[in-house]
Amino acid sequence: MKLPEQVVRLGTVIAVIVAVVLLLRFVILPESFFSATPHQAAKVEREMAKPLHYAGATSCRKCHEEQFTAKNGGAHRTIGCENCHGPSAAHAADKKTAKPPKPREREFCLGCHAYQSARPNGFPQVDPQKHKPKKRCVSCHDPHDPVPPETPQDCGGCHGRIERTKALSEHALLPCAECHQVAEQHMIRPRQALPTKPDSREFCGRCHAVESDDPAAAKARIDMAGHGRSFLCWQCHYAHLPEGPR
Amino acid sequence: MNKREFLKDAIVFFPAAGLLSALSSQAAGKDPSAPATSGYDPTDHWYGMGIDVDKCIGCNRCVEACKAENDVPDEPYFFRTWVERYTIHADGETTVECISTKPAPVDQVAPENPDVVRTFFVPKLCNQCAHPPCVQVCPVGATFQTKDGVVLVDEKRCIGCRYCIQACPYGARYLNPRTRTADKCTFCYHRVTKGLLPACVEVCPTEARIFGDMKGRADRLVRFERANPISVLKPDLNTEPKVLYAKLDGEVR
């Protein structure tokens, strides 16, 4: 059977249109014409390929171990190298071309250490007009290991929050040294000699065991044999703010 | 060649040329929707930041580092991150100043104001919301959320209509005057995908900023979240910010 001429022509036209549409949809037009996924993926790749400017303190350590160790034992241990020395990725890649700056001006240190009432309590601050005006900070303080020129006289100088909490608690009258043995070195280099914590249940039991006759702890006695035997007391009870009688 | 022959040839030539060019471009360039090849899997991460307001000393170093790392314009009103000073007065009034716009002079101390009840610094940045309003409003799909939870702006698609800048409840976006497109914090996406910290976290001298991955079981941010009373900015908007503030004062908005 032979198809009529007009059907063949019409069929050809329809076939051509279908072919063109399919060609447009799947071959000629890019996928990004229909979906957001390709351009988002391309953006993510462009974003990941952006150049670094800050190398990170761990890469400084590879060559400057001495300074890194000094800094990590002192009061500036939380500060990354590039905080003061500026973005140094170029220097980390090629140590000869780009020398990171060494800020030595007084103003640089005062950016953090000038007194501002909004700064948190206990953060070391000076009044720039009263504290050795016009003198460079680095002439007395080593920036990699700054030591406070005067050692704090009491624990609250650094541990102010604990001191204020304890002052409100049932333990207000106990001195810090009752429970913590503090080496002299801790006052100068806090991280190098950490204070002790009570390491036995019997330590708290001196006052809080039922057999104890300490009048101050009369309201807080516990049978040490039957209460939380596998734990140290301070693992559950915060000794700076113990639960008082309700 | 007469007109009829020319038209016949043209009908064949143009689709064939299009077909060939499409095929050759597909052969030359790899499929753009394929995942990145660096071995980094974004679905393993869900990034967030923790900010301990009690530790911020308002030194502005994070702002400077952000500008250096991300090529943010120098003018003091384009910020990806910035620091605000909140001052609460005795009469209950709260004033907020952006100290990144006008840093305090370092050589003199402002006189103590007896009216001030308390005052403190609050670092701010894009909250990288889990439900970002800026992504909803973008008319061209230029801003989107990656699989690791960072909201990015495609500067090639952005038409600079500023609708997202209006929609952001945290004021975290600005129009970059050079590219004329919207710009914002990316959590230093080029750094964190290589395992480095964002520039602001890298330089923060007091560890007031913590960067981490909420999918990591013992991650620093997860521990930070567990150990501190956490609040987020404008929780009532249900944007679910991923910037978590510890011990945040109730006056902060």
Image (tube, coloured by chain):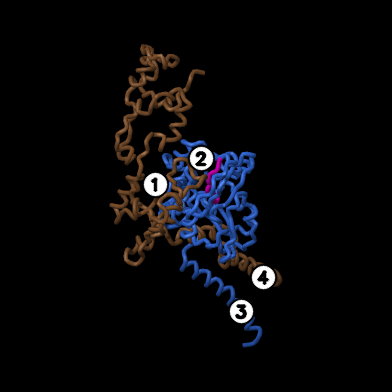
Q: Which residue is mark 2?
A: B246
Quadrant of image for the C terminus of chain B: top right
Q: Which chain is brown?
A: A
On screen, residue B118 above or below A206? below
Examine the structure image and report whether residue A227 is included in the region drawn in magenta.
no
- Chain-order first, disc 2 or disc 3: 3
Q: Please tell me whether mark 1 or mark 4 is closer to you in this view.
A: 1
On screen, residue B12 above or below A88? below
Q: Nearer the viewer, residue A189 or B122?
A: A189
- Chain identifier of the residue bearing label 2 in the image: B
Residue A13 is marked as 4
Q: Colour of chain B?
A: blue
Residue B212 at x, y = what percent?
45, 45
Q: Which residues are magenta?
A: B118-126
Residue A205 at x, y = what percent?
36, 18
- Chain-order first, disc 1 or disc 4: 4
Graded by Cα atoms within 10 Å as few (under 14), some (14 to 19) or many (20 or more), the crowding at tag 1 reads: some
Q: Which residue is mark 3?
A: B10
